[in-house]
Image (tube, rainbow, N blue to C red):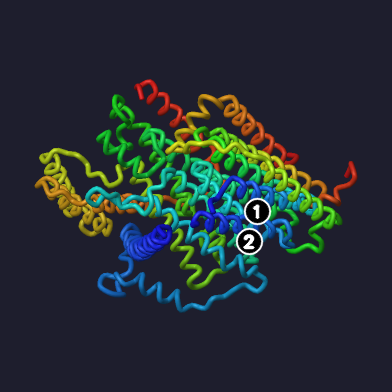
Amino acid sequence: MQVGLMHYLVLSALLFCTGLYGVVTRRNAVAILMGIELMLNAANINLVAFNRYVTPTAVGGQVFALVIITLAACEAAVGLALVLAAYRSLETTQVDEINIMKW
Amino acid sequence: MSWALELLKAIGLTLVIFTFLAVVTAMIGVYAERKIAGWIQARLGPKHVGPQGLLQTIADTVKLLQKEHITPRRADVLMFNAAPVVVAVAALLDWVVIPFGTLGSRVLVVRDINIGVLYFSAMASITVLGILTAGWSSNNKYALLGGLRSAAQLISYELPLALGIIWAAMVAGTLSTVGIVEAQIQQGGWFLFTLPPPIGRLGAPFGILAAVTFLVAATAEVNRVPFDLPEAESELVAGYFVEYTGMRFALFQLGEYGEMFGMAALAVIMFLGGWAEPHLAPYLWVAVALGAVVLAAVILLTARHSLIIRPVLILAVLTAAVSLLMSVGIHLPSIVWFLLKLFTLVFFLMWVRWTYPRLRLDQLLNLSWKVLLPLGLLNLLATGLILTLGGR
Amino acid sequence: MGELGVFIILALVTLIPAVVVVTSHNIVRAALSLVPSFLGVTGLYILLQAEFVAGIQVLIYVGAITVLLLFVIMLTEGGTGVRLRQVNEQVPLGAMAAVWLAFVIIVILTRTVWPIGAGSPPPYNAVAIGNAFMTDYVLIFEATSLVLLVSLIGAIVTARGEE
């Protein structure tokens, strides 16, 4: 059996939902960011798979995937800087302990 | 079933590369480093084990193999054992894209990936993970500090490394290592001194700047002096591998030496023409041979009692021999030229190691972010401008 | 046949560490499990003949983002060992939602008829992507570089603390 578009789509759906489970259930802020990275990877797999199977001669999907990788790096950097800054004043990284608006 | 054949070929070539690295870089490289270090420091280096100390590395390997494997009590065992493997494997995987020369019409490379130099810099960035894991899983404050410092240094110097690589890829017009060497063969000169015509020799400053940026970043990437603060014995008790004993320690060293040789090999490919032999007229080769002989004679007569004459004499004799062969018309095989250039560059790196003092961590990071990164970017911009104006 | 075998191996290498990432109690081990997951995705890109994206994925995701995550874990409290409770009270609800969403997405995707295009990918990937970035997609290229600059400055300012 040949590897078709459907295989990649199912795989990326499973990866996306794994990341979603991580974002919803984890308490540590860094673990939530790891779930977000998994979701972005799943979206990237989708884009590159569509590029390969629907429009093989164009590279638009790969361009978009590269932009998403770059933006994921930016977002990880800013998010982790926020976690560090929050840890410095609130002394915790568990997101369900950060439930008052002042410190 | 052709995929089974490809798999077998890949495994076989991997074993060949591993053997080459284990024998050449680890054994000969460590021996050469200790001898050269000795001569520069006015002492003799290993002399007792075997003739002229040639079996010293084998003795050291046997010693390391029979040492006990100690794991710290509350260390994370899986990560503790995996970290040296990650570092060593990432350093060995670098060598997949390095071409050694040509044999007839085939290029001797394990796999000429068409994103070759990008793959190389990706493998070089995996070692950071191994070092961070080693520092963390040792359950030791000094190891953690050394690991964090080393990781900060390595990720800071990945940028000038990548800028040097991008410079060479831009001038050659391709990301493949074989393509970069063939671009240099086609233009008839090394990227270090010439840019593609019609710019020619005017591009020498850009090439030299790119090569210097790359080599400084490469020295920092493999944690060598003058950038070895994270692993210096007098600073942090050997940093991130303080808790490693026996063969795991040897794996770290193998990774470091393999990566140093790999970076030197990539610099040879990108800036020194790879396996191409220099094109000089026969009388120029005779002139080079005569010059080497004169230099050797002058050094012998003036500095007879200093030990520094030994490596210089060896280099002069080697240059004279190679030049005489080339002037007569005997063409050395391309793999010999590649290895000659590789070992000359590695000698240069070792010479730098025993000449400069160690940089402090903030000086080290300043050098990367405030000096090498702007220089690399400006170099890239200027070279791109000149190539476009020159009509590429 | 070989390609399907490779795809299944890469899918397992991607998905099993991903499950470890979202369920492990040791957060350093969770962060390190991201690495085989990302390497599996790299293998999938190479299988899809997108080599440049694969190289960039290793360089940035494995070499930079994972290192950044590990740094922050080691500098905050996650690094002091295994905590008592790593997951919050939404575990059954979250698991149900994730499974249901996976089911819905897979059903929708398999029931749509995708227009499979003919042709083969360009032989030299990096050249095609470079050309595309400079001609068709130059706006997004410039915008991304601006976002990179702003986020770099923002991250430095945010993480620096009060002086």
Q: Label 2 is placed on what type of residue? A: Trp
> Is any atom of residue A96 visible in this view?
yes
Residue C98 place in picture, x, y as percent: 77, 51
Picture layout, residue C159 above or below residue C142 = below
Front residue of A57/A69: it is: A57
Disc 1, SS: helix
**The numbered mark 2 sits on a residue in which chain?**
B
Q: Label 1 is placed on what type of residue? A: Leu
Q: Tell me if C69 is positioned left or right of A103 in this view.
A: left
Residue C9, numbered label: none
Residue ID at (64%, 65%): B140
Q: Tell me if C75 is positioned left or right of B322 in this view.
A: right
> Is any atom of residue B153 visible in this view?
no
Distance CA(mark 2)–CA(mark 1): 10 Å
Residue B266 place in picture, x, y as percent: 38, 47
Evaluate if marks 2 and 1 touch, with contact meaning CB atoms under 8 Å apart.
Answer: yes
**The numbered mark 1 sits on a residue in which chain?**
C
Residue B136, numbered label: 2
Q: Tell me if A8 is positioned left or right of B32 in this view.
A: right
Q: Please rate how many residues cluster around mark 2, counting C-alpha atoms within 10 Å: few if below 14, some from 14 to 19, many from 20.
A: many
Picture layout, residue B239 above or below residue B75 = above
Residue B168 place in picture, x, y as percent: 39, 37
Residue ID at (40%, 54%): B95
Q: Tell me if C132 is positioned left or right of A37 in this view.
A: left
Front residue of A9/B290: it is: A9
**Residue that mark 1 sits on:** C70
Q: Please rate how many residues cluster around mark 1, counting C-alpha atoms within 10 Å: few if below 14, some from 14 to 19, many from 20.
A: many
Picture layout, residue C158 above or below residue B325 = above
Residue ID at (86%, 56%): C89
Residue ID at (49%, 51%): B123
